Image: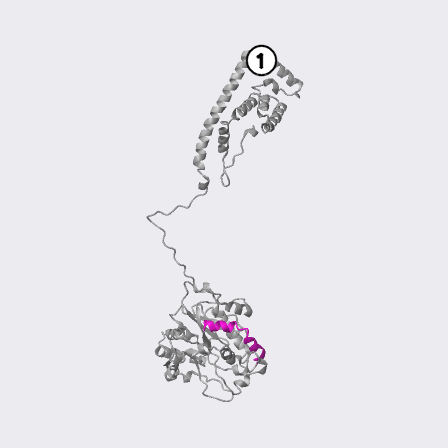
């Protein structure tokens, strides 16, 4: 009977229940071979009381029937093995004696009682009709069930429901990324080489929704920031317009509270020795960390002794509106200028390109990228500008000269340093508590004239140094009036 069942597949992803399989079997009875299958089933049913060996023989002949149906003698084999068309031919040759006796007695009974034979045939016919009717009914109901349960292959997987026309979906809102998503901030485990490499990458595609430009304040300190309260007053209320980066001695235990603007601003630092190339390496390290934030567009180098001379809006507007960067570079023929040049720097750096200038710069992003990605001039400084060469006073001015960037620079610094005290080994003036007056600060703010975007202005310096730690309290008292800073006292 297994050979009578068709192999039906509804395709992948469709699960067919046993009920559906029975329905498909029932529908098969409608085909031309349904009668022969029904006869074979009926015969097996009527001879269910036979021994297990007879059933095994019957199974063997069923398999022979399957093979015969694939050949040219389908109808002859079906007739030969169908007990209702040729019952005498079904008798196998390998039956036991008991089975032969039973078969002989049954044959004699049929010969003596013809009505029994007719009744048996009538019973077989009724059984076949019953099975056919049952099969057609079951097939009809099962087909109806299959059509409802599995309408079509295109509807096997559920479709997402559409929103009602009366309430359309709102337009997608642009997600505003936090500033910390744009860069790696704070302490990290990158080496200087990896840091400089990542910082030197220039985006080739502009942001569709560029963040508001920020000014990066780079503090190169020895240990801590004693003037932190003044700077906190300066940054107060201007969040999102600035970034802070602090490079201090690795052994420093400087700590600030979590509510301070300086919290979490330290960058991985190394020991810096005054007058050596380590100073310039620290500056490039600060720049590289700040460049990881694409919203930083201007970069100002400061020290722990620097103070602001104007409020934040003035400084911010001054830097972003400027068409120039602020790098001081000049040719000093004396021992503190050309006297520091080494002939071993040739041919990459010629004496005519050698320049000197203030360490405290304010540059835009383009020049900052050139500084951290420079593999042409900086390695020369690393090899030949050792102790007492003061690379921090010569590298950036010489870079501007060697690459002919004069048109991009205002050729001055925005940080005021007082060198008036002179001497063979001059150091800038240091301001203590008793020297801090309103007149001093006002002179620093408006005591000079310079060019800004092609016109003359008296605002030439935005910052000043060197202010000792004991000046903090007096500066906090004078700042609100002179610099229009909000008082934190």
Q: Where in the figure is residue 310, as x and y percent of width and height?
A: 38, 77
State which region is magenta.
364-386
- Quadrant location of the C terminus in the rendered image: bottom left
Task: Identify the secondary structure beneath mark 1.
Answer: helix
Q: Nearer the viewer, residue 466 or 182?
A: 182
Residue 286 visible? The answer is: no
Does 374 appear in magenta? yes
Residue 163 visible? The answer is: yes
**Magenta-drawn stretch, dominant element (helix, strand or loop):** helix
Residue visible at 51% across and 72% down? 372
Q: Where in the figure is residue 255, as x and y percent of width and height?
A: 48, 71
Q: Where in the figure is residue 86, as x and y percent of width and height?
A: 58, 18
| Extreme residue toward the top, this view | 112
Label 1 CA crowd tier, 10 Å (few <14, some 14–19, many 20+):
some
Q: Nearer the viewer, residue 261 or 92?
A: 92
Q: Residue 460: which quarter of the image?
A: bottom left
Q: Residue 105: which quarter of the image?
A: top right
| Extreme residue toward the front, this view | 72
Residue visible at 45% across and 29% down? 140
| Extreme residue toward the left, this view | 166
Placement of 226 over or under 20, stated as above or below: below
- The colour style of the image is one colour
Placement of 142 over or under 219, stated as above or below: above
Residue carrying label 1: 110
Placement of 35 over or under 266, stated as above or below: above
Residue visible at 57% across and 81% down? 387
């Amino acid at each position: 009977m297994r050979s009578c069942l068709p192999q039906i597949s509804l395709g992948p992803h469709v699960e067919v229940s046993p009920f559906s399989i029975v329905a498909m079997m029932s529908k098969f009875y409608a085909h031309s071979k349904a009668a022969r299958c029904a006869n074979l089933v009926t015969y097996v049913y009527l001879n269910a009381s036979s021994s297990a060996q007879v059933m095994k023989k019957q199974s063997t002949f069923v398999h022979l029937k399957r093979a015969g149906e694939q050949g040219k003698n389908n109808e002859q084999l079906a007739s030969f093995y169908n007990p209702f068309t040729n019952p005498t031919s079904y008798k196998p040759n390998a039956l036991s004696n008991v089975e032969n006796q039973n078969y002989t007695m049954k044959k004699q009974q049929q010969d003596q009682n013809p009505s029994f034979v007719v009744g048996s045939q009538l019973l077989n016919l009724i059984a076949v009709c019953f099975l056919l009717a049952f099969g057609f009914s079951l097939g009809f109901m099962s087909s109806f069930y299959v059509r409802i349960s599995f309408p079509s292959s295109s509807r096997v997987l559920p479709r997402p429901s559409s929103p009602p026309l009366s309430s359309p979906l709102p337009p997608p809102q642009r997600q505003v990324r936090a500033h910390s998503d744009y860069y790696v901030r704070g302490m990290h485990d990158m080496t200087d080489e990896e840091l400089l490499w990542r910082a030197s990458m220039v985006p080739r595609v502009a942001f569709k929704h560029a963040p508001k430009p920020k000014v990066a304040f780079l503090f190169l300190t020895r240990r801590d920031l004693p003037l932190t309260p003044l700077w906190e007053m300066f940054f107060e209320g201007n969040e999102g317009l600035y970034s802070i980066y602090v490079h201090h001695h690795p052994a420093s235990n400087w700590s600030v509270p979590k509510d301070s603007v300086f919290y979490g601003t330290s960058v991985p630092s190394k020991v810096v020795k005054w007058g050596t190339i380590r100073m310039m390496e620290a500056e490039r390290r600060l720049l590289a960390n700040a460049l990881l934030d694409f919203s930083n567009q201007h970069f100002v180098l400061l020290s722990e002794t620097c103070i602001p001379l104007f409020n934040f809006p003035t400084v911010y507007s001054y830097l972003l509106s400027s068409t120039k960067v602020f790098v001081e570079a000049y040719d000093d023929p004396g021992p503190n200028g050309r006297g520091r040049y080494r002939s071993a720097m040739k041919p990459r750096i010629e004496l005519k390109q050698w320049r000197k200038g203030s360490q405290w710069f304010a540059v835009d992003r383009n020049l900052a990228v050139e500084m951290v990605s420079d593999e042409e001039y900086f390695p020369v400084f690393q090899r030949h500008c050792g102790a007492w060469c003061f690379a921090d006073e010569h590298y950036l001015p010489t870079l501007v000269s060697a690459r002919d960037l004069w048109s991009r620079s205002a050729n001055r610094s925005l940080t005021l340093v007082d060198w008036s005290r002179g001497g063979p080994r001059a150091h800038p003036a240091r301001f203590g508590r008793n020297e801090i007056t309103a007149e001093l600060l006002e002179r620093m703010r408006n005591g000079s004239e310079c060019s800004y975007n092609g016109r003359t202005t008296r605002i030439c310096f935005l910052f000043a140094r060197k202010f000792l730690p004991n000046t903090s309290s007096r500066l906090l008292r004078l700042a609100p009036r002179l610099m229009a800073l909000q008082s934190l006292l």
